[in-house]
Amino acid sequence: MKVLFIGGTGIISSGSAALAVERGIDLTLLNRGQSVRTPPAGARVLHANIRDRAAVQEALGGQKFDVVADFLAYTPDQVQANLDLFAGKTGQYIFISSASAYQTPPAILPIRESTPLYNPVWEYSRNKIACEELLLRAYRETKLPFTIVRPSHTYDPYYVPLPGGYTVIDRMLKGKPVIVHGDGSSIWTLTHTRDFARGFVGLLGNSHALGEVFHITSDEWLTWNGIFRIFAQAIGVEPNIVHVPSDLIAAYDQTLGASLRGDKMHSAIFDNSKIKQVVPDFVCTTPFSRGAREIVNWFMADPARQKPDPVYDALFDRILENYRKAWPEE
C-alpha cells in the first residue's frame, strides 16, 4: 500500500508513521523538515511546504497514492486546496479533525461520533467543523472517498500536555505554585501517540472507513488534579496546586482561555466502540503514569531541552498574584 502523510513528524502523526513503516506500508512524508522528531527509517521524506503549491507539485511529480493522510489542514480553504491537488490521485483522503469539534460542553457522556458538532468558543474547533462539512458535501456530490479522524488530547515523549508545557514541570521542580483550571475535578482523556497509531494505521486503505468518522482515544479517564499529580510524582516532588477559574485565566490570556473554555474545562469521556469494530486490534496500552515518566526522562536527559517559557512563567505569576489578592484564603 502506497501512503502519503502530509506532515508525519508531529505529535499525532509521528507514532502513526513509525507503525505504518513497521507494518510494511510504502510511506512517504511531505513536510518542511523542521520537527524535533526523526522520521522513521524506511519512510521516504520529501521536503516542501504544503501551502506552496508549486513546490509540492515539483516534489510529488505525478505520483498517485492509495491513501493521503492530511495532518496539516486547519481551514476549509486548505482542505479544498489539497482535494484539488490530489483529485484523481488517491483512493482515500483522511482528514485529521479534532474531538474539540464536538458539542461544547457535551450534553451527554460518553461522547460518540454521533454527538453534534458545536463549539461556540474556540475558533480552531469551528474551523475543523467547517472542514468536515466541506468533506461531507463533497462526498454527497462526488462520492469523495474521505475518512475523518478526530483525535482528542494526544501526546508523545517530547511534549508536555499541560497548558504552558515544560514551564509547568520547571515550576514544580522549583517549588513554585502551578495553576489547575477550575477545581481540577473535571475528567479528561490523554492518549499516547503509540496508542493512537494502532487505530489510525488500521484505517489506512480500509474499505469500511470510507465516508466514515472516527475518534481514536484512550479509555483511561483522569481528573486534571490527577494529571498534575502524576507529573509531579514522575519528577519526585509534591505539587503546589492552586485552582483558578477558567474564565479568569481567559481574562488574562485569550489564547490559553479559548483552549480551556472551548475544550479542557469540560469533562471528555469517549466511547471508542466504533474504531474497535472497524479496527479490531485497536487497544491502548500506555497509561499516563508511564507516558509521563517517558516525557520527564526525555527532558531530564538533556539540559538543552529544559527551557521554560518566560512568557508563560510570567503569566502564571501574574494570575496567581492577583488571584491571591482577591481570594487570600486560597
Image (spheres, helix red, strand yellow):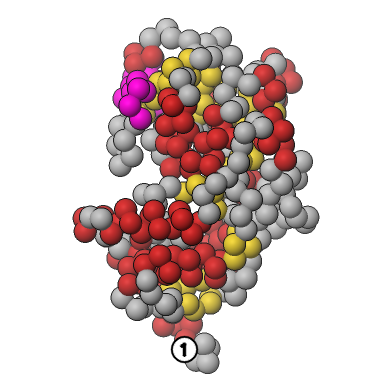
Q: Is residue 324 visible?
A: yes
**In which quadrant of the rendered view does residue 174 lie?**
bottom left
Farthest bottom residue? 329
Magenta segment: does it hold 51? yes
Q: What residue type is labelled 1?
A: Lys
Q: Mark 1 points at which residue?
A: 325
x and y, in percent, of residue 162 in the image: 46, 60
Observer-nearest of 246 and 5: 5
Above or below — where is 29 with respect to 324? Answer: above
Observer-nearest of 186 and 119: 186
**In which quadrant of the rendered view does residue 33 lie?**
top left
Residue drawn at x 45%, y 20% is: 24
Magenta segment: does it hold 323? no
Per the rendered image, the range of residues in magenta is 40-57
Indicate the secondary structure of the residue bearing disc 1: helix
Residue drawn at x 71%, y 46% is: 271
